[in-house]
Image: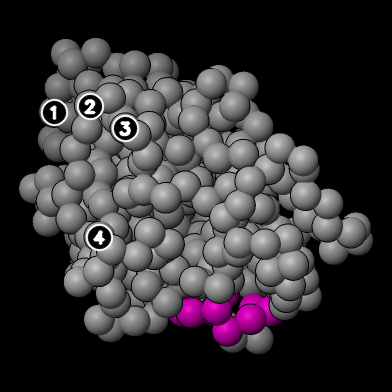
Amino acid sequence: MLPFRRLSVKGYVYAILQYMSAPIKSIAILHSDVRREYFLTQEGYETEKNARSDAHAIAQYAKSLARTIHIVPANTQWVKKIISLRPTVVLNIVDSVKGDDTKTPLVCATLEMLGIPYTGNGFKPIVACYDKYAVKLQLEKYQIPTPKGFVISGTEKVQVPPSFTFPAIVKLNSIHGSVGLNDANIVHTEKELKTIATQLIKKFASDVLVEEFVQGQEISAFLFDTAKGVRVLMSEDVLKGGSDPYAIASYEFRWIEKNPIIETRKFTNKHIEKIMKKAYVALGMSGYSKFDARVKGGVPYIIDVNPNPAFAPPEKDSPFAKTAQSMFDIPFQTLLSTIILSALLKK
């Protein structure tokens, strides 16, 4: 069967009619098994502590799409459970396995081995995106704008390339969700860089990625497969009441602050949409993904790629769903149906 984004409009309409007239047998919503003891840091736990309640919230919308809905935690018994249920499709919202997000590709690999369709990206792009520097090299290969950068590991001395210029931003190379990211991560000297890099490596047991800091608009782009191709929904992070050129969407902004100094608003730009779609294809993505970029002089420099962004209804504060519904008038029910159908129509 053809990948979803290559399906003709006529074929898509036929598939929708078939889908609506005969609801699929069952959907399994597979979510992270979240326990505080699994996570190395409180920050990591905070990004996933609502995984179970998110799954139950999704289930309320999924009831109209399938005869049976199953909610399955990705614990040590999940494979046995999925085999016994044999769902028509798995809604995969797993972000970590025993607190380790780098193990989430194993979920995809297992579902592929079992021959069970699942939502979101496949094994290969998810594996690739847990090395942000490798993703940067792939973007550069396809001449997609991204800031200059280099990696620092915990076993080597910090060596700044001669052509590298400050200011710079220091972030974790293998951990997503803005974990470990705050205003102090923007550095102006090699001494500051070494200090922050050492702290992050020690706390999170992860290599760090250092990038030249792009002073410009910060945007988020959510991409997902539709009948007419990949659709892009973009929002901009806007500093309220100020013009700090070093303001960033930090961990606190994403997960903790109730009244952050940064707010989001709708952002549209056809040229930037094309670049985001090019990156989506270059990285072999499907289902849905999230790209973050800083825009300077009309050029969007991609600073982060998330192949498995948080997915939940807008009332659960999911940026993807909130952007779709509040800024682009796409109800969550429609978004959910589209994503599930794309999983069913993949190869």
Compare marks 1 and 4 and give the one earlier in the sequence. 1
Q: Quadrant of the N terminus?
A: top left
220 to the left or right of 23? right
Quote the CA–CA distance across marks 3 and 2: 11 Å
The foreground one among 74 and 104 is 104
The residue that mark 4 highlights is 238
Compare marks 3 and 2 and give the one earlier in the sequence. 2
The residue that mark 2 highlights is 270
Query: Measured from the top left, where is residue 179 in percent x and y?
Result: 55, 69
Query: Measured from the top left, where is residue 114 in percent x and y?
Result: 60, 41
Q: Is residue 236 magenta?
A: no
Which amino acid, mark 1? Answer: Leu
* Above or below 305: residue 73: below
| Label 3 Cα crowd, 10 Å radius (few <14 / some 14-19 / many 20+) | few
Q: Residue at x 37, y 73 (%)?
A: 253
Which amino acid, mark 3? Answer: Gly
Whether residues under marks 4 and 2 lie with C-beta atoms below 8 angstroms apart, the answer is no
The residue segment tinted magenta is 39-49
* Above or below 132: residue 198: below
Tell me the quarter of the picture where residue 316 sits: bottom left
Q: Would you say residue 241 is visible in this rendering? A: yes
